[in-house]
Structures are given as structure tokens and as C-alpha cells.
Amino acid sequence: MPDNDILTERQRDVLRLLCEGATDHQIAARVSASKRTVQREIVELRAHFSAGSRTELVAVAMRRSVR
């Protein structure tokens, strides 16, 4: 899917873990980043997918099979 080509590897990892229900803290530990970095990635992902919330981001990503 084209969205996968645009996302960085970290963004894909963050999005996948977010779709699995992981918390910011859990995602940070899994991708070896700070919680703040994860939160920033999620903000960027929300903007990329025009999602108003984290929940909408997950729904859009799952609908588009971007994980």
C-alpha cells in the first residue's frame, strides 16, 4: 500500500504496536525510543492520516491495512 512506502520504519513500528493496543510506554520500550519520541511519532502519524484522535488513527490504519 502506498502509505507504507511513505512511512519511516519507526513510524510503521509505532503504528503496528499502537494497533495492537500497546501504550506509549510499551511502544517506547519496544522501539528503543523515549516516550516523548513515540508521542511525537503518533502526532505525525495522525497528521499523515488526517486522524483526529489516536482511535481514529488506528481505525484508518486497520481499514487501509497499513500496519
Image (spheres, grey):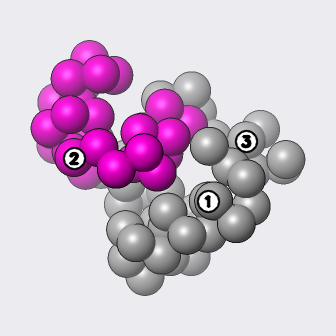
The magenta region covers 12-39
SS type, badge 1: helix
Disc 3 from disc 1: Cα separation: 10 Å
Looking at the rendered structure, the secondary structure element under dot 2 is loop
Q: Is residue 28 left or right of residue 9?
A: left
Residue corresponding to mark 3: 4
**Residue located beneath label 2 in the image:** 23
Residue at left offset 46%, top offset 51%:
19
Q: CA distance from mark 3 to mark 2?
A: 22 Å
* In this rendering, position of residue 19 left or right of residue 38: right
Mark sitting on residue 61: 1
View extreme (bottom): residue: 52
Q: How crowded is the residue under tag 3: few (<14 C-alpha within 10 Å), some, or many (20+)?
A: few
Amino acid, disc 3: Asn
Q: Where 64 sits versus 37, above or below?
A: below
How many marks are shown on the rendered structure? 3
